[in-house]
Amino acid sequence: MRRRRIGIAALVACLGWLGPAVALAQQARPINVDVTVSQISQQPGPVDPRASRLDAQLRGEFRYESLRVLQQKRLALDLN
């Protein structure tokens, strides 16, 4: 009988400790990431309007004549 009480007390203690961890895991939301695959080139051409922010960041770092967006995706990444 004493073993059963100790076992039940240990189980209750474990469940009490796991409760907050389970709650946090259930509340964790995925992280949304926007991915843009672009091509920069020395060939004359336009800058894709969808890449205007990227162009502003890269213009001072690289020399290129054209920039175009090849693909855009939004990914939802789970934690861990």
Image: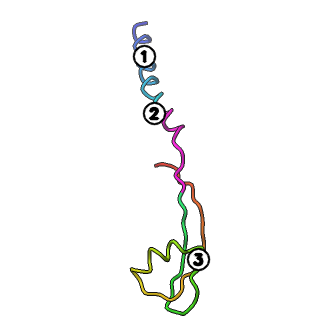
> Where residue 50 appears, x then y in whole percent?
59, 73
Q: Judge from the rendering whether residue 24 lies leftward or rightward of residue 75; answer left or right.
A: left
Q: Residue at x 45, y 19 (%)?
A: 12
As rendered, which of 27 and 19 lies closer to the eye? 27
Q: Nearer the viewer, mark 2 or mark 1?
A: 2
Q: Residue at x 50, y 38 (%)?
A: 25
- The magenta span reads 21-32
Q: Residues within 10 Å of mark 2 (few under 14, many from 20)?
A: few
> Where residue 1 appears, x then y in whole percent?
43, 6
Of the two numbered discs 3 and 2 on the same chain, state the one appearing first in sequence: 2
Q: Residue at x 41, y 83 (%)?
A: 62
Question: Badge 2 is on which residue?
Answer: 21
Residue 38 to residue 2: above or below = below
Distance, label 3 to label 1, CA atoms, is: 61 Å
Per the image, is 23 magenta? yes
Q: Nearer the viewer, mark 3 or mark 2?
A: 3
> Where residue 55 appears, x then y in whole percent?
49, 77
Question: Badge 3 is on which residue?
Answer: 69
Residue 8 to residue 28: above or below = above
Question: Badge 1 is on which residue?
Answer: 7
Kindly give the residue lying farthest to the bottom in the view shown: 43
Distance, label 3 to label 2, CA atoms, is: 42 Å
Distance, label 2 to label 1, CA atoms, is: 21 Å
Q: Residues within 10 Å of mark 1 (few under 14, many from 20)?
A: few
